[in-house]
Image: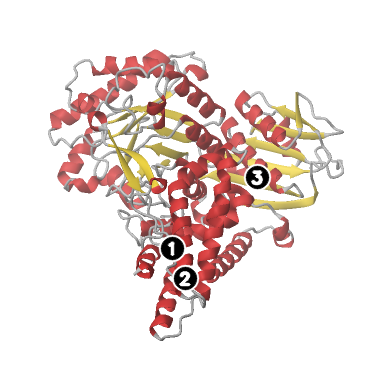
Amino acid sequence: MKRARLFKICLLCAATLLFFSSITDVRAQVYADRLYTIYPVPRKIVPMPGQASYDGVRIVNIVADSGIDRVTINRAKQILADHAIEAVISDKIDKKGANILLGIVGSNGVADKVADHLKLDKELFKHQYFDSHILCLTNELWGKAGGATAQLVIIGENTDAVFCGLASFEQMLDSGLSHCVSIYDWASVKHRGIIEGYYGVPYSAAVTKDLFRFMARYKMNTYMYGAKSDPYHSRYWSEPYPTSITAEQESIGYLTQDMMRDIATVAQNCKVDFIWAIHPGKAFAEGTDKDIISHIMNKFESMYSLGVRQFGVFVDDVGVSSDPKILNLCANNLTLLQQTIDQKWNRKGAAPADTVKPLQYVPQLYAYSWADADKGRTFFTSLKSVPEKINIYITGANVWSVPNSKDVNHVAVELGLGRTPGWWWNYLCNDQDLTKLFIADMYTNFRDESHISSISRIDRETGLNTLIVNPMQQGELSKIGLFSVADYAWNPKAFNNDVSWEAAVSAVVGKEWAGDLFNIIPALRYYDNDEFEYLISRYKQSVERGKPAYGALLSELEKVNTSCNRIKGMKDSPKESDRLFYSDIRPWLLKLEAMTAEAMALLKLKHSTSPVQNSTVPARDYENDPDFRFEILGGMGEHIKMAERTAEPAAKNLLPFIYWLRE
């Protein structure tokens, strides 16, 4: 394990040097060790002369241009409040105090004028980037330095871009403001986020809202809700959500109207487009319901009253028709549904907050390799006529493909869709690997997931406008992988797999728990760490030679066991996200703790110099012990059912070794 950690540290240093070597400004080399660590990795960080901090500052003046919405202003206030700083909203710069200026480029507002005064380069706004913004941390605004008091200017192409700039500022403030910098940044992918579309227990309202807050911090902006086992998404798709549910129903992911309203509100406050998707299946795709548009609109109106402002339609996993009449009927339904939405909510003069964004559509043939070229061309060509603004999703050639430009172009051009599809990425999804966790780095997860090609590598140029990932049933644990997905989708060329993963673990659980989590993640994998494999093999060889040497193995077991025990403290943490994280990891954590404890005891008993007569080590039932079991939901529509599974950490090396020791 030490060798692996040393290797990762070397990678971190190399990646850091590589990143800064790309900055042409000579000063970047001088101050490289004093710049900020921000994720997703920004496009360009340019050091500026001087120091800036909020040390001793208890009030900050916020000046927001007219184009900055209330959600963005509230985000700035919340960031300051989290650091015990009061915010005052005004329309003028406080020339004696600290300021945050927020504005839209070209607006001629206060922030825009100050950006010109500071000679910030606005060239990036001339390109068709996404969420383009400039952040400048300085200690002067109008030519006279204000000591070391921090002055922050963020200008963006729109208020959403400024919101992204505040995410960078939050991370800078967390680490302690020091050096003055200008950050020039934008995203490669416009819509970046999550699709809750796996087969299994839907996320609780608490987990979903916590994910929204996480997404705001790391510049993800899209969450499509299509939980397969939510009956009001599939089986009861035309019925409104209930006003009350039982405790048992809540434990398996049911949501009430009030819960959904709360979820939609938190999403709005985090600038996450919350897309509620309906799964009418063949009723939509094959015309078995003659009043399908009316029935869908009734449900959409119900969801609209709960605060939802974007919708999706799923007809996946109901079979792929080859009948052109059926395909055209499906396309006509989709077109008519979009037109009906526009007529109801998107009329000229409607307030922006009342409008509904374009439909998101998951078709039957989302993995194009299921059909031959002619059938695929017939299918996707039938969708070419639907309104251009409707986003149509694929998973690539296969269900578990990794995003790549080849598949994107194949569907758009060769199969005749006529537009860039959105990408539904089945990663970190474990609905086909229910007993496994995927919380290692991206490429290790690719090797561990049974349906993803183990040699897959990410494509630096996909050409996608939408990239949403279908994560594990453990939403809090999924944050580790989601962090790196956010990093990749924002700035693919700067993405470094190992460095991003190292940063993800610390970002998700904080410094208090990160060290222990690093210690146990390799053993929480089904294919447990190479360190165990190496040490177990070496120990067995020493036994065969008649000279047992188990010290190194015992030391590794003790380290993992101790970290497991410490991480159990998350269940009593004052932070909700820690408690939710522990709830997700519990069966794997308790089983790994028990396994390492038994292995340690068996080793000590076997090699004790003064063995106790008839001494034995209690053997846990690693398959059926309720501490290691968890509930799942399977199926969709009328076929949803409950089941139980057993967590499987360290199944490749440690568990067989325990059985070997028992013998």
Q: In the depicted view, which residue is nearer to us: 541 or 414?
A: 541
Q: Earlier in the sequence, mark 1 or mark 2?
A: 2
Mark 3 surroundings within 10 Å by alpha-carbon count, few (fewer than 14), some (14 through 19), many (20 or more): some
The residue shown at (73%, 28%) is 63
3 vs 1, front mark? 1
What residue is pinned by disc 1?
617
In this view, 451 is above or below 75? below
Number of the label disc, if any, that sits on residue 171: 3
Task: Determine the secondary structure under disc 3.
Answer: helix
* Residue 417 shows up from this direction: yes
Looking at the rendered structure, the number of numbered marks drawn on it comes to: 3
* Residue 375 left/right relative to 425: left
Nearest the eye: 230 or 344: 230
Q: Who comes first in sequence, dot 3 or dot 1?
A: 3
Q: Is residue 471 above or below residue 258?
A: below
Please state the horizontal and vertical placement of residue 641, each as a whole percent of the image: 27, 34
Q: Looking at the picture, which amino acid does disc 2 mark?
A: Leu
- Single out the mark in the foreground, 2 or 3: 2
Instruction: State the residue at coordinates (42%, 68%).
Output: 614
Q: Position of residue 636 (x, y in %)?
A: 26, 33
